[in-house]
Image: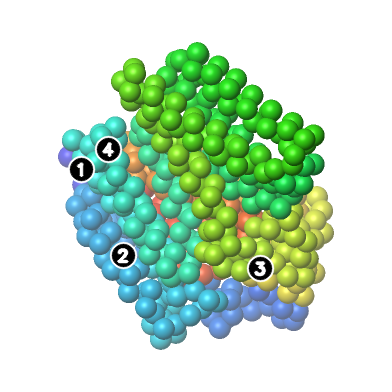
Amino acid sequence: MVYTRDSIWKTVDWWTIGLYLILVLCGWLSVCGASYDYGEPNFFDFTTRAGKQLMWIGCSLGLGFVLLMLDARFYDTYAYLFYGILLLLLFGTIFNPHEIKGSRSWIVLGPVSLQPAEFAKFTTALALAKFMGEYTFSIERTKHMLICLGMIFVPMILIILQRETGSALVYFAFFLVLYREGMTGSVLFAGVCAVIYFIVGIRFNAVMMPDECTSWGAFSVFSLIILFSALLVKAYCRNQKAVNIILLYGGGTVFLGLLFSLYVIPFDVAWLQGFVCVALVGYLLYLFLRERFANYLYVMLFSICSIGFFFSADYVFNNVLEPHQQIRIEVLLGMEDDPTGAGYNVNQSKIAIGSGGFAGKGFLNGTQTKLKYVPEQDTDFIFCTVGEEQGFLGSSAVILLFVILICRLIMLAERQTSRFGRIYGYSVLSIFFFHLFVNIGMVLGLTPVIGIPLPFFSYGGSSLWGFTILLFVFLRIDAARER
């Protein structure tokens, strides 16, 4: 097939571009509403937030045009180069003397401030697609899997060192891409287990059982480790006898120990559970040596890592996380009630959204946003402006637009004829999904406040440019899929 640059306008997906333009327009109107003060509105004044955002939008449209004009092979050829350059920028930004809201993730160039972390998502997606798109790549090979994890975690660690934890957590979205490309579901299961261990362990760590010696958090987590290990033996080792032994002897020992602690001599049953888990690891090692079946080793590794994660979670929570991050998690889990402190943002956001009712108060008529009750209302908490001014109907319409965009990206990713295009497409939609889920979740008080923007809505040039680059590079790759 003869492929000319002129044919890009015939093959590019105009539906996605249309969705992009609608979302950007809605985002700008939301910034206008969030930054508007009582008086004569002047949204086209470049000294105002709305005017600056309009300038970023104009630059983004020009940037999208340039990205579509470049040859699709350009992104494949220079993927590693872009990745390396952004890693250097991320590393250099760690030593940046300029701090903005406690973060060193910004590069200040005169009146312009750029955040390399927003662009690193695009380069990581390109590099991952380049590596996984190689003919010899196999996700089942340990070496290849470790390289993929390294490509994800290296920028993530550099961003954490910049004190930008929210942007770093976005990189977990790439695990959805790995799963789509054949990564075993046990890895996702382990991730879900880690979240459960952390939440249950932290939330109920200080809540004591009736014996007043055993923590409900420790007891619950150890019980889950034993149960999950038994389920994994059943699923991956097909040994029902071993499952019965684990549940009967392990669960029975814990049950008898609990009765002894309740009615005879109180003691910390978690210590007994710890010994049961050690015995469980030993039993799995014995089964491996007897049957020479590697899956027993994997289940044993899961049990060991689960125990290690549980003991390290408390240390990380108390010694690694910043105080404001600790209190946010405690408020989310119901451990603390801090309506004037860490919970202030979320409480005010809920009030703003609730006051919008079914149809909203109308454009520029939101009282909570006009009186600046909601901090960061034009950046991380921009969705509360939508809820107050446009109500349930407007909020649902915005969410529906994002859902349509994500579904469209899934369709585009699945129709790619190259592995590179498919993997990059799934990287893009995974990042969009993560941002959408976490941002709206934290505004509604369903997820911790980690400070990540809502795509195309939150005020800021770096965010808007980053999402534009992610999307339009994929559109360019998709337009050349039949080449």
Three-letter amino acid code at disc 3? Gln
Q: What whole-number distance in Å separates the C-alpha atoms at marks 2 and 1?
A: 31 Å
Q: Which residue is mark 2?
A: 86
Q: Is residue 342 above or below residue 392?
A: below
Give the camera-side residue of 442 and 219. 219
Q: Residues within 10 Å of mark 4 (few under 14, many from 20)?
A: few
Q: Position of residue 218 (x, y in %)?
A: 63, 44
Marks 3 and 1, the one that precedes in the sequence: 1
Tell me if residue 133 can be seen: no
Marks 2 and 1, the one that precedes in the sequence: 1
Marks 2 and 4, the one that precedes in the sequence: 2
Q: Which residue is mark 3?
A: 377
Three-letter amino acid code at disc 1? Tyr
Q: What whole-number distance in Å separates the C-alpha atoms at marks 2 and 4?
A: 26 Å
Marks 3 and 4, the one that precedes in the sequence: 4
Q: Is residue 132 above or below residue 256?
A: below
Which quadrant: the N terminus? top left
Whether the residues at callouts 2 and 3 have beta carbons within 8 Å, the answer is no
Whether the residues at callouts 2 and 4 have beta carbons within 8 Å, the answer is no
As drawn, the label of residue 3 is: 1
Give the camera-side residue of 163 and 314. 314
Residue 38 placement: quadrant: bottom right
Marks 4 and 1, the one that precedes in the sequence: 1
Q: What whole-number distance in Å separates the C-alpha atoms at marks 2 and 3?
A: 29 Å
